Image (tube, helix red, strand yellow):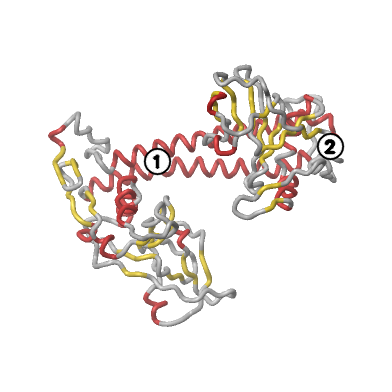
Amino acid sequence: MILSQLFEVRRNVVDPRLHPKETFYYYNMPAFDENGQPELVRGSQIDSAKFIVDPGTVLISKLNPRIKRVWHVRNDGLFRSICSTEFVNVVPRKPATTDFLFQLLRSEGVYRLLERNAEGTTNSHVRFKPGFLGQIQLDEIAEEGSWSSIASILNTLDFQLEQTEALIAKYQQIKAGLMHDLFTRGVTPDGHLRPTRAQAPHLYKESPLGWIPKEWSSGLLSDFLLGGPKNGYSPQEVDEWSGLYTLGLGCLTTDGFRPNHLKMVALGSSACHDALLQDGDFLLSRSNTRELVGLCGIYRDVGCPCIYPDLMMRIRPNGKTSTQFLEALLLSPLMRVRITSAAVGTSGSMVKLNSRSVLRLQLAMPEKDEQAHILNLIHAQRDTLMSLECDLAKLRQQRQGLMHDLLTGRVRVKVAKAEEKL
């Protein structure tokens, strides 16, 4: 089947009736919110071209097709929609096929075609020559009578995905607020947040870091470590398995250690032995972009011998704290500000932390019992987020497999009873 039988690519038309005081849904790549929805703007706020977008139109981004960007313009009766020159307007020939067309244009086959025709590297774009989309050949496609049912199934899955993503965003905001409170107010022996200083000033004392709970101590990071930081070692990378991995900087994330960037390296000198990691080692990056420098994590055994690179340092906490609490503290919003401020360098992409600046980081430390209470609250929040992220991954996997099977007709839907989806 040829896709041009389903839609036409409409030429962008400037609307001469746009009024500077009128409010629009504005489809413009930099203007989408965190949920991928268009921004609400007045006509006077729009700088780029103002093209009419009719309800039912499917917009395809010309930029970065590797990032899947297809939008369905719906009419809620509140405002008109317009778009910038960054989109191609695809209009279904039959209004009843709009939802199916939207799902079809989001399929892997169409995205692969867009990728193959993309030009450029960092900001790749597709040149939509006349008839480009319309000539896409689909070897298999579901029967037309089932299109509305298929679209309904996939739209339901999309809604579940959006709801789960919204929940994750909500809990991430809750986590950020909780982390701030835990590392400025702490918790009482019964595990509840300590009242604020405004509510109970007698529970706080002044320190070089400002007001902190009376039971807390303030000091330098060196006061809570066994010795100084030890830099890693970076041997030559190899293409064949030598029996040794090294961590990449990407293994230290805002959520701690993740074994998602391992490299094969050559076996070598005694420096390899000195940098060999053990389960539970505490690592901190000493060079990266300013946003990522100083990220830390607790190494977990990856199943093979592994070392850490020269751009990381290993530190060991003493009996005043644990690796788990130190990780949570150094990843907290306030400490991230102090760590990135301590980094030096003129490069716009890479800055560095030296051992002295790391050892002289100022921090406030609760007693061990309170540390345990704080960690319990953090772990509970983390478990909730991990569960939601697991649900999201399952939904995405389910949608990907089901989408291909439904669109190609490999899985048939019962058209007679739309409520019986499969």
The image's mark for residue 239 is none
Q: Which amino acid is tagged 1?
A: Gln
Q: Residues within 10 Å of mark 1 (few under 14, many from 20)?
A: some
Residue 139, percent from left and from top: 85, 46
Callout 1: SS: helix
The answer to whether residue 422 is seen in the rendering is: no
**Distance CA(mark 1)–CA(mark 2):** 49 Å
* Above or below 158: residue 43: above
Q: Residue at x 39, y 81 (%)?
A: 270
Percent position of residue 204, x then y: 16, 38
Quadrant assignment for the N terminus: top right
In the rendered view, does 357 fall on the left or right side of 384? left
- Nearer to us in this view, 80 or 228: 80
Q: Residue extending furthest top?
A: 77
From the viewer's perspective, is 422 left or right of 65? right
User: Going by the picture, which residue comes out furthest to the front?
Assistant: 16
Which quarter of the figure is the C terminus placed in? top right
The mark found on residue 4 in the picture is 2
Mark nearest the camera among 1 and 2 is 2
Residue found 43% across the figure and 56% down from its top: 348
Please name whichever residue, 23 or 285, is drawn nearer the observer in this view of the structure: 23
Badge 2 marks a residue whose secondary structure is helix
Q: Amino acid at mark 2?
A: Ser
Query: Residue 218, image x and y in percent?
Result: 18, 50
**Is any atom of residue 177 visible in this view?**
yes
Q: Are marks 1 and 2 in contact (CB under 8 Å)?
A: no
Up-down relation of residue 186 to residue 418 (above or below): below
Give the residue at mark 1.
381
Q: Is residue 400 left or right of residue 97?
A: left
Q: Residues within 10 Å of mark 2 (few under 14, many from 20)?
A: some
Q: Earlier in the sequence, mark 1 or mark 2?
A: 2
Tally of numbered discs: 2
